[in-house]
Image (cartoon, grey):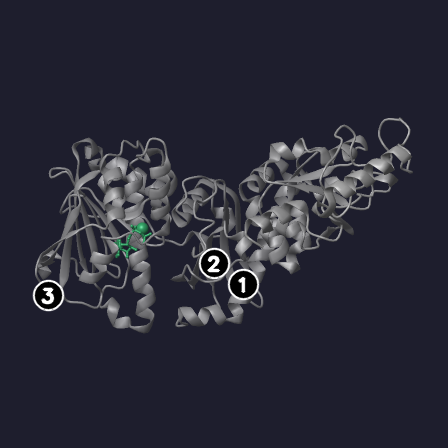
Amino acid sequence: DGAAESRVFEADVAKLLQMMVHSVYSDKDVFLRELISNAADACERLRYEAISDPTLLADETRPQICITIDAERRQLTVEDNGIGMSRDEMVDALGTIARSGTKAFIEQAQAAESGDGVTLIGQFGVGFYSAFMVADQVDVISRRADAKEAWRWSSDGKGTFTVTPVDESEAPARGTRVTLHLTEDATGYTDRLKLEQMIREQSGHVPVPIALVEKPGAAPTEIADGAALWTKPRGEINASEYADFYRSVAGQFDEPALTVHFRAEGRQEFTALLFVPQNRPFDLFEPDKKQQLKLYVRRVFITDDADLLPRYLRFVRGVVDSADLPLNISREMIQESPILAAIKKSITGRILSELEKLADKDAEAYGKIWEAFGPMFKEGIYDAADRRDTILGLSRFKTTAGSLRSLKDYVGALKENQTSIYYLAGQDAARLEASPHLEGFRARGVEVLLLSDPVDSFWVTSGPSFEGKPFKSVTQGAADLAAISRLDASPEPSQDVSAGVAEFLAFLKTTLADLVSDVRSSERLTDSPVCLVASESGYDRQLEKILVGVGQ
Ligand code: ADP
Ligand code: MG
């Protein structure tokens, strides 16, 4: 309606702002990365929308992010000529919390002992609101690409914001200008050299050029050229450039644990630059989480929502740039495209083969990846029948013989007459090791996988085998131990049950009646007198417990 209006922030935003304003987090530099990333997103969205409506670009076709220092007024401005925001978009985007990541941040910060979440900021990246770590007032002036009018959003971060129409002369021709009124202790951010370094390090590879203006009216200096890193040949990119790019594309703060950069030619032509993070991104178990690969078509960003990877690889981040998809394809149509399916198949295969290579060449580095992402990866054993053998081959286990054991190691250490891969599943890794079920196996030097991820009970009962050896639970029936000889030379306990034992078994069966289906003497125990087992044909004990837990 054109009038100024004051509004109260949504409760979650207020909480978040409270944390930002009072933050003593030392690495406040991240605010700039967040603002630049929003500016770049806005330029990319414009580029995409202009495919169907070229008039949106008017006579300003080159995307640009410009950062201006005004030391005298202690201000910093981040301006872009991207898509801009209408009044309603502003109220919505800057008054509520849309990002699932930020919600997760608030939850974890509140659960954290200190309650202020300071130490968490570095791991999350909290978006636009991080500006309030360094500013006590933030003004956002924006004009949408298809609109004439412009609006100012303004807030001191203390619970309310205002939205006011602004005069055309005050607004950028198109896009958004964010002005930070820096707090006294953030005066350092008016230092040109410091800013230049921050931009290069945090945002040097955003796909939009970035210029710095050292004081109002001065000429802009280009700091980053906006060249898409993935289009350069591998040999021309060094590790720190890859790491910088990874951090800006993935919103992560760590180093990539594995970088996979390749160009596919032939039936499908595309370039992929993919990363496996070192640390677990925080949102891996959110069911409605978007994919984390950005899809480009000939350098135009299309979507980060395309189905480019199987679920079990959802920790992989990066970009895919296709030369074959039509640019004007709708996001919905993309999903149906056979080209997309072919790309998905190809990058999945490539990631798996690169992981295999790493596992061969650097077991320690691979082990770290496994420890971070193994539980997700194992979902692929039952989700992805076509990749099952590969994923089993890449899997690592804690066993009675050590940690990070592969199935190859396991099969290489089979005992004479051993025909199965034995496992024990349960929730608590420490308790598994002490289980009486293991006694008979230990006595024979038979290795047992100790499975304590919740996902284990599912894949292991989905009928997998490795190199022809089925998986078998040690809790299930008589575990073929009689055929395997004990390590110590002591004579095998006699096979036929003595009269006394038979009598005792009969007594137990009558006493326990319907509570058990059978009572048997067994080879599996050495020290403990008794243990519970599941029947050979039924569910494994651990799966039984889970099913009982969910009311099955
Ligand atoms: P995210 O970028 O993850 O969506 P942010 O908190 O960084 O979360 O930004 C919130 C929203 O504000 C963005 O999704 C976008 O809609 C809007 N926004 C922020 N900065 C800009 C900008 N420079 N141009 C256009 N829209 C912007
Ligand atoms: Mg953002």
Residue at point 63% right, 37% down? 363
The residues tagged by marks 3 and 2 sit, at their Cα atoms, a distance apart of: 42 Å
Which comes before the other along the chain, label 3 or label 2? 3
The residues tagged by marks 2 and 1 sit, at their Cα atoms, a distance apart of: 9 Å
Residue at point 81% right, 41% down? 520
Query: Which amino acid type corresponds to the residue marked 2 in the rendered image?
Result: Val
Taking depth in this image into account, of 108 and 300 the one nearest to the observer is: 108
Residue receiving disc 1 = 343
- Residue 84: x percent and y percent? 23, 60
Query: Which amino acid type corresponds to the residue marked 3 in the rendered image?
Result: Asp
Residue at point 34% right, 47% down? 102
Question: Mark 1 packing: few (<14 Cα in 10 Å), some, or many (20+)?
Answer: many
Is 216 on the left or on the right of 434, as rendered?
left
Which comes before the other along the chain, label 1 or label 3? 3
Vertical arrangement, residue 518 with respect to residue 293, above or below: above
Is 170 on the left or on the right of 119, as rendered?
left
Q: Quadrant of residue 481?
A: top right
Q: Are marks 2 and 1 in contact (CB under 8 Å)?
A: yes
Taking depth in this image into account, of 21 and 134 the one nearest to the observer is: 21
Mark 2 element type:
strand
Disc 1 or disc 3, which is closer to the eye?
3
Residue receiving disc 3 = 1
Query: Which amino acid type corresponds to the residue marked 1 in the rendered image?
Result: Ile
- Residue 145: x percent and y percent? 22, 65
The residues tagged by marks 1 and 3 sit, at their Cα atoms, a distance apart of: 47 Å
Residue receiving disc 2 = 320
Disc 3 or disc 2, which is closer to the eye?
3
- Residue 218: x percent and y percent? 16, 46
Question: Mark 3 packing: few (<14 Cα in 10 Å), some, or many (20+)?
Answer: few
